[in-house]
Amino acid sequence: MDAVEQLLEIYRKNPCRTLPNAFWKTAVALNPARLEIEIDATQRLESLAVWKGDQLLAYWCAKLEKCGLSERQISQVPFALVHNDAVHLFTKRAFRTKKPYFRLHQQGELAPYDLPRRYRFETVQPEVDLKDVAGLIPACYQDIQISEEIVKSWMTHPVYAPDLWIWIVENRSGKCVALGIAEYDPSVPEASLEWVQVLPGYQQQGLGSALVVELLQRIPNQAAFTTVAGENDNPHDPEGLYRKCGFSGKDRWWLLAE
């Protein structure tokens, strides 16, 4: 069994604890990255580490005293994505960046939600909508810039699913006021929510919830679960939105960087 297959077997059992993001993103990096795992006598997982050079792409351990990392690694790693269960290993480090991220999953019945009547859903048409997609996302943030070339690159991902790119359009004006993008990886099988954005001025109307539920309804039935991740410190409280739409979990990941 190679590293990707080994990681996938672990991930299917507990995706949000195993990795800080959708499986395919780490699987792509596993060449030339390396996977290190520790198993106890009962075949239970004790620790998991995904390394790419000196960067720690994912780290989790069941018991800090059996962490599998050396003191040198803990003291010198320049970048790490660490599960909340193990972040205490790094308390002596003064990282310049230390950000918490939630990681949730959804499976089973969907929470019902209706789109307000003054709006409609439309599937994104990539041939003509690149500019609009690239424009809407930065309009929802102060510190994110997205180009048409970046949007086009998303369509080359192995998990690109065109039916999971959707607009919410205002009926009267024809204006695209919200965007949802999800991806689907049949190898897991897993769906992941990547973007759920509502323009300022159209928020607090339930459009975010409508987008999430519509995406979940469109996801292929073969998907075993759907995952999502996001910043805990986001003032718009995306975690609250996803939980309201049926996502659950207690996993937190920390981005640590010098």
Image (cartoon, rainbow, N blue to C red):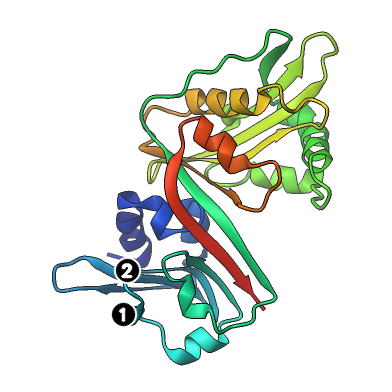
Q: Residues within 10 Å of mark 1 (few under 14, many from 20)?
A: few
Q: Residue at x 82, y 14 (%)?
A: 174
Q: Disc 2 designates what residue?
A: 62
| Horizontal side of residue 59 vs 44, given as left or right | right
Residues at discs 1 and 2 in contact (Cβ within 8 Å) = yes
Q: Is residue 105 left or right of residue 211?
A: left
Q: Could you tell me how far apart the alpha carbons at marks 1 and 2 are, in whole angstroms? A: 8 Å
Q: Position of residue 17 (x, y in %)?
A: 40, 57
Which residue is more in the foreground, 157 or 196? 196
Direction from residue 159 to residue 148 in the image, left or right? right
- Identify the residue at horizontal 54%, vertical 36% (top origin): 242
Left/right placement of residue 67 relative to residue 115 reads left
Front residue of this view, candidates 157 and 60: 60
Q: Between residues 153 and 63, which one lies in front from this camera angle?
A: 63
Kind of residue sitting beneath label 2: Ala
- Quarter of the image for residue 189 reads top left
**Could you tell me residue 43's position as x and y percent?**
17, 67
Amino acid at the residue labelled 1: Lys
Q: Which residue is mark 1?
A: 66
